[in-house]
Image (cartoon, rainbow, N blue to C red):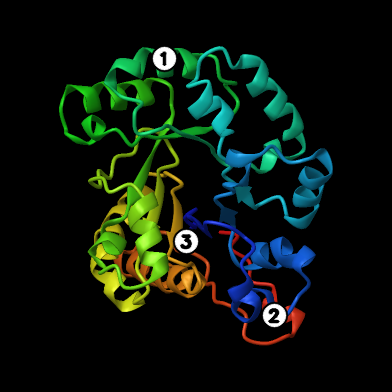
Amino acid sequence: MSSSQLYLGLPMWSHSHWQHSVYQQCQQSERLARYAQVFNTVEGNTTFYATPSLNTVNNWASATDDNFRFTFKLPKSITHEHKLHNCQQALAEFFNVMAKLHEKVGVWKIQLPSKFGPRDLPILNNFLTQLPADMQFGVEVRHREFFAKGEAEKQLNRMLIEHNCNRIIMDTRAVFAAPPTTAAIIDAHEKKPKVPVHPIATAENPIIRFVGEHDLDKNQHYFNNWLTQIPKWLAQGKQPYLFIHTPDNDFAPEQAVDFYQQLRAKLSNMGLPTLANIELPQTNDASQDQLDLGF
């Protein structure tokens, strides 16, 4: 039986709480390499705040194998400060710095501010028209009208389909259902977008950013819909990206692997192409740590 391609990852690759669950007591400089032995993608939000040095980019490339996929955000100077206007030089300079990683970037993410609304769609269309044709992109919108199932959302979706651009899906239902009893949940309530979940695939790499709460069991109710939707996309030959967050991300690796195993079982029960088995490392034996997500 052939295999399916699902990319599974977390918001970042470096987190001190994962020293036992993911890294097995490695040095901080080795965290990306250890992370990439378990997961095959990562969000890579650092580029939103600052463009890395060439040396850093080279180190990231060396730490990951050819099957690993980053999903870097475009710098906020382009998306939030320039608002996609007159930024071709800045974009070219950014891609030039990141050139060593181009083959390992699955999707470049364009996160737009909440004020970027329907009247700005011509700006987005012009920006997408000028992007390199050999790269995959995803757009994350936060303006409420893009979730109202009206003409604005229809125009956005048509535009993304025309440009073969993925619509990034934020699923924050679980974390917003949690009472604000911890600093991490309060922070998530303040910073994460509370928007409806519309599971649409406008290109070949639908991207889900699932934000759960501390109680991993309570997240199950909100993930059940994805146990149905993701296999449908895989059956269509699409290659989805699934990123799992929790308020402080301390146990995001455990939640991600649990959800992944459920998806794997669901595909098997449906008679669809399988996913490779993954689990978090349990020993310091390097041979046990080498958990390949290659499908």
Q: In which quarter of the view is residue 179 placed? A: bottom left
Q: SS class of the residue under badge 1?
A: helix
Q: Nearer the viewer, mark 1 or mark 2?
A: 1
- Circle 2: is it few (<14), some (14-19), or many (20+) Cα within 10 Å? some
Q: Amino acid at mark 2?
A: Gln
Locate residue 146, reporting x and y percent: 25, 31
Q: Which residue is mark 1?
A: 123
Vertical placement of 227 versus 71: above or below?
A: below
Q: Amino acid at mark 3?
A: Met
Q: Nearer the viewer, mark 2 or mark 3?
A: 2
Of the two numbered discs 2 and 3 on the same chain, state the one appearing first in sequence. Answer: 3
Q: SS class of the residue under badge 2?
A: loop
Q: In which quarter of the view is residue 33 placed? A: bottom right
- Residue at 49% x, 57% y is 2
Q: Which residue is mark 2?
A: 24
For this view, does 144 lie left or right of residue 71? left
Q: Is residue 63 visible?
A: yes
Vertical placement of 109 versus 59: above or below?
A: above
For this view, does 266 lie left or right of residue 27? left
Q: Nearer the viewer, residue 110 or 7?
A: 110
For this view, does 60 lie left or right of residue 208? right
Of the two numbered discs 3 and 1 on the same chain, state the one appearing first in sequence. Answer: 3
- The C terminus - image quarter: bottom right
Tell me the CA gap for discs 2 and 3.
34 Å
